[in-house]
Amino acid sequence: MSTYHLDALFHPRRVLMLGEARDAATRQLLANLEASLPADRRSLVGAERRGWTCAPEQAPWPNGDLAVLAGASWLNPGTAARLVRCGVRAVLLPGNDAIPADFVAAARRLSLRLLGPRSAGLASSRDALNLTTLDCRILPGKLALLSQSQTVAATALDWARGRGLGFSRVAITGAEADIDLADLLDHAALDPHTRAVVMQLGRIGDGRKFMSAARACARGKPVVVLQTNPACALGPVGTDPVRSAAFQRAGLVECGSLAGLFDALAALECLPPVEDGDVIVAGNGTGVCTLAVEAMLRQGLRPVTLDGPVQQRILPLAPAARFMPGAVDLGDLDPPTLAKALQSLAQAHATAPLLYIRAPLPGASHEALAGAAGACGLGPRLLTVWLGLDTTLAARRVSAAAGGATFTSPDAAARALRYRWEARRTQELLTRTPPASPSCPESRHRVTTRLEHWVQVGRKEVHGAPAAGIIEAYGLPVHARCGGDRPVHVQIRCHDELGTYLGVGRAAASGAGAPACGFPPLDPLLARRLLESAGVAAESPELVDAYSEGLLRLSQLALEQPSLAAAEMEMEVDAAGGPSIVEDSPRLALRGASLAERRRVALAPYPSNLEHGVFLRGGRHYLVRPVRPSDEPALLRLLTGTTPEAIRLRFFVSMRQFSHAMAARMTQIDYDRELTLVASSAAEPEEIVATATLVRDGDDRGAEFAVLVHQDHAHGGLGRHLMLQLLAYGRSSGVSVIRGDVLSENLPMRRLARELGFTDHPDPEDPSCRKVEAALAPAPAGAAEPGLDGAAPAI
């Protein structure tokens, strides 16, 4: 259901509470509810309490949006049905009671959303709403805190309160009978009051759903995540490297500890985006400056070495200043002089943050210096570190009250800066345009048949010549070890939560460490990043290109063959400069029981089944397929070559400049929630002449379409064909309503919509626009998806 009915959770007009508060947590929730909502927006059912509207269990219940269920006796299908009749769309389950399966099934059938069980509740600063079981006041802010663990959330909230940091929303999912972190990420991505997300995660229920939501949110907002392993999973200490690789692929920034989570809170709330990793460092001693510089370098940041003109500006203010690589020791300055020195230092770099670190030496008090620093006008560019404890508490309070980011150590400050820098870098990496991938082998269907036959006869492992034959079918030759460059060891494995992944590292004989992990599908850019993580990318460009091509082919093998449970092999570069597999190294493990694709692959694969050709009016032959990230240059050529009027009708504004960011958003899509079809003339398949997009709503029940056809290919049936394809795809995907916004003057599009069964209504908010909408009946059982057989629907 994703974001369906989540507004009722965070912005309820009225809250019903069923049952009595029998434990400390529920009593605290009741007290928070009383303090958050006036009496006319809350009601008790089945209990009595002064100051509340109360209703007996057997009497008619009042209407409401959100219900809180206190006690196992309410967890039955009858309660779910009565709540829905009262208008309730979401339920909070704070207790530790096991949730009966029939109650969950009834809630799902009735579209009733559940938060919990074992949830510590939620809060929304927009409505001053606190429905948590926690004894703390939550300050308003721009961060969303999402957590599966109530203890981690409680600790983070208490820490943030002590630093004066606030939140736009808080949600603790508990055991996740229904609403999970993916749903909340999707909802936070759409919330204009949320600037960034901080998240704790201990388990992933649906890897495909989580990755889709994480990628969508991280494209627009920084997301920092702390992973914790389940308490029952006794194993290696540390984070799960496969999860870490998934976070990186989705564009999330991972913090490795609870202290790191605290630093992330401060970074996202108080610091501006860090543009290029440069940092200006100043302090009141060479020792503390050295500590700060080393902390920055450990986090991959670049302390700025101040040049002669900057030094000449500083020396009149601080005659005893000592300049060192990456920092300046200002010595002991009085508060007014310190403020002037910091202002002068900030001029050394237009955007770099400035860190001031101070040890508790004799002279002006920390508190007075903190006040001067906070008032010097640098705003969020200034970070402070007040070393010590007893003499620094007041200074930290003053810095926090001024809205500045203040830390207890240079390492904490450096981590916070790295999180802010990484958040920016990951958003840029998410939109880089990859080159085209090598073509897929036509022999993949033969490989599928062979693997399925081995499974049917009970074979579990394959090695030697049969395994080599499978690898060679994917364009990778297998031959004797050439003895040249050190081979790369490649594994294909299946993670319990995130499905199939590739592990890449140096072969064991080369002293390899833990492999780097990546997820199919790969493209050339992702393959190179995987090699960089494995320490292989330092080789010559030719070797890296060869290894990248080999990884792309193995990624296709892992993606396309559901019977393949695991594999391992060694990859070399042969005499011709191409990737090859060392003879006798391939070993394949087969999967006896089938695994649903959503469980097997965490990232939606390219929907090649939608590729097809079509002949339209005048015998024009077109090739239609889903868009690929490498289509960005061709899409930009389409946009710049289309008439200004056609562009205005498509985008509702006149545009002649089209950015990389815009084109990347249109080509680098998540096939799990969006489809863009591109059409090319069969005579010029590299040139795109039309696009059609269908984007699903957050609740997966509706979708919005948009179509653009180049003027040289208009009025020939291409737009109609693409619309028919979108309708067929939406129907097969379970979408019930497709709609679009069309300018009133766009008569051809409105006429086509009416001919295809859309209704046409005025837009109540924009008289220049019309809303067209079509209800879709479910696809008949066994119906083929569009384009499967290469034939076009009737036009």
Image (cartoon, grey):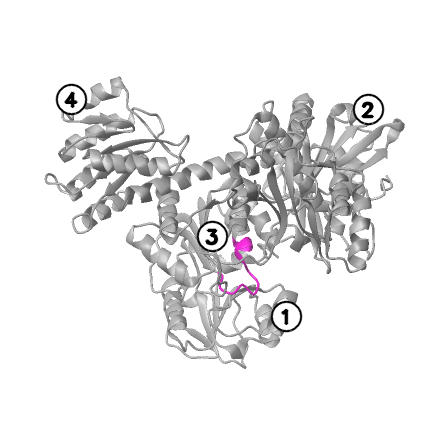
Magenta segment range?
173-184
Choose the circle earlier in sequence order: 4 or 3. Answer: 3
Counting from the top left corner in percent of width and height, residue 97 is at: 50, 74
Our reading of the magenta stretch's main secondary structure is loop
Determine crowd level at label 1: few under 14, some 14-19, many 20+ residues with C-alpha closer than 10 A. some
Q: Nearer the viewer, mark 2 or mark 1?
A: 2
Choose the circle earlier in sequence order: 4 or 2. Answer: 4
Q: Nearer the viewer, mark 2 or mark 3?
A: 3
Q: CA distance from mark 4 to mark 3?
A: 50 Å
Q: CA distance from mark 2 to mark 1?
A: 55 Å
Counting from the top left corner in percent of width and height, residue 623 is at: 80, 32
Q: CA distance from mark 2 to mark 3?
A: 52 Å
- Report the residue marked by disc 4: 316
Q: Amino acid at mark 2?
A: Ala
Secondary structure of residue under mark 2: loop
Secondary structure of residue under mark 3: loop
Q: Amino acid at mark 1?
A: Ala
Secondary structure of residue under mark 4: loop
- Report the residue marked by disc 3: 239
Q: Amino acid at mark 3?
A: Thr
Counting from the top left corner in percent of width and height, residue 318 is at: 16, 26
**Residue 98 falls left or right of residue 636:** left
Number of the label disc, if any, that sits on residue 683 = 2
Q: Nearer the viewer, mark 4 or mark 1?
A: 4
**Residue at the extreme right:** 619
- Report the residue marked by disc 1: 106
The reply to whether dot 1 and dot 3 touch (C-beta < 8 Å) is: no
Secondary structure of residue under mark 1: helix
Q: Amino acid at mark 4?
A: Pro
Number of the label disc, if any, that sits on residue 663 = none
